[in-house]
Image (tube, grey):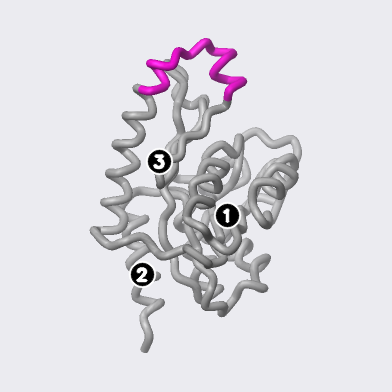
């Protein structure tokens, strides 16, 4: 299956989440930036509030596309020990990468929320959404960070992921929902016709639109 764009992917994903529709205990958290257009469609279909849950990849020195791990809202840092060991990355280098990405994480939270507090997730069913999983390190960091906020349960939901993701996130989360799990799987973008980068302005606009839609008439 190839999705036209993130909007279509979000609608397809929402179709798999009908059991959560109309429930007052459900919150949708999207991983920015690419997860927000998907999360918007899910939140709209389920009539649920939408917020961001910021995760930043920790890129390897000189190979930024290769993830050493990730940092998420709440300060949780997850490292892939195998990659760190294979590349011989020293602790001081990791600390510098973490410090830099923590600054960017804080900047994005302030930018997207416009000074408003994060949605309350304690005791809620939280649906964590992204536009797809490749290594899964960002989503794993998000799940770990979210656990510390005491939600009732965590549902990881994505349009596309490798087949191995189901077993991994069935262990990490309380439920895993995925529209398509093609093999072989190389990159999320190969399963979208339009995988243009989502900008900060689009993220803010979608959050504002969902906020207005969620207001009582």
Mark 2 lies on residue: 209
Query: What is the C-alpha distance between the residues marked 3 and 2?
Result: 28 Å
Is 120 located above or below residue 184 in the figure?
below
Say if mark 1 contacts mark 2, CB within 8 Å. no
Mark 3 lies on residue: 75
- For discs 1 and 2, the disc positioned in front in the rendered view: 2
Is 2 located above or below residue 51 in the figure?
above
Q: In the rendered structure, which disc, 1 or 3, sits on the residue that comes first in sequence?
A: 1
Viewer-side residue, 28 vs 96 = 96
- Range shown magenta: 81-95
Callout 1 secondary element: loop
Crowdedness near tag 1: few (<14), some (14–19) or many (≥20) residues, C-alpha within 10 Å: few
Q: In the picture, which quadrant includes the C terminus?
A: bottom left
Mark 1 lies on residue: 4
Task: State whether residue 177 appears in this view.
Answer: no
- Magenta portion: prevailing SS class: helix
Viewer-side residue, 206 vs 105 = 105
Which residue is found at the position 66% from the left and 56% from the top? 174
């Amino acid at each position: 299956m190839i999705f036209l764009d993130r909007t279509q992917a979000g609608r397809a994903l929402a179709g798999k989440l009908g059991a959560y529709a109309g429930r007052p205990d459900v919150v949708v958290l999207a991983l920015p930036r690419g997860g927000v257009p998907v999360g918007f469609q899910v939140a709209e279909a389920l009539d649920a509030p939408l917020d961001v849950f910021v995760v930043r990849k920790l890129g390897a020195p000189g190979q930024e596309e290769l993830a050493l791990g990730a940092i998420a809202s709440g300060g949780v840092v997850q490292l892939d020990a195998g990659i760190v060991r294979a590349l011989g990355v020293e602790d001081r280098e990791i600390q510098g990468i973490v410090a830099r990405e923590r600054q960017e994480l804080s900047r994005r939270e302030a930018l997207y929320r416009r000074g408003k507090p994060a949605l309350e997730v304690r005791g809620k069913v939280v649906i964590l959404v992204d536009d797809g999983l490749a290594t899964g390190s960002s989503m794993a960091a998000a799940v770990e960070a979210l656990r510390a906020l005491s939600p009732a349960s965590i549902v990881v939901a994505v349009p596309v992921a490798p087949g191995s993701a189901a077993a991994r996130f069935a262990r990490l989360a309380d439920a895993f929902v995925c529209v398509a799990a093609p093999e072989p799987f190389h990159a999320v973008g190969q399963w979208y016709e339009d995988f243009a980068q989502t900008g900060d302005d689009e993220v803010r606009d979608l959050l504002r639109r969902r906020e207005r839609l969620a207001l009582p008439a």
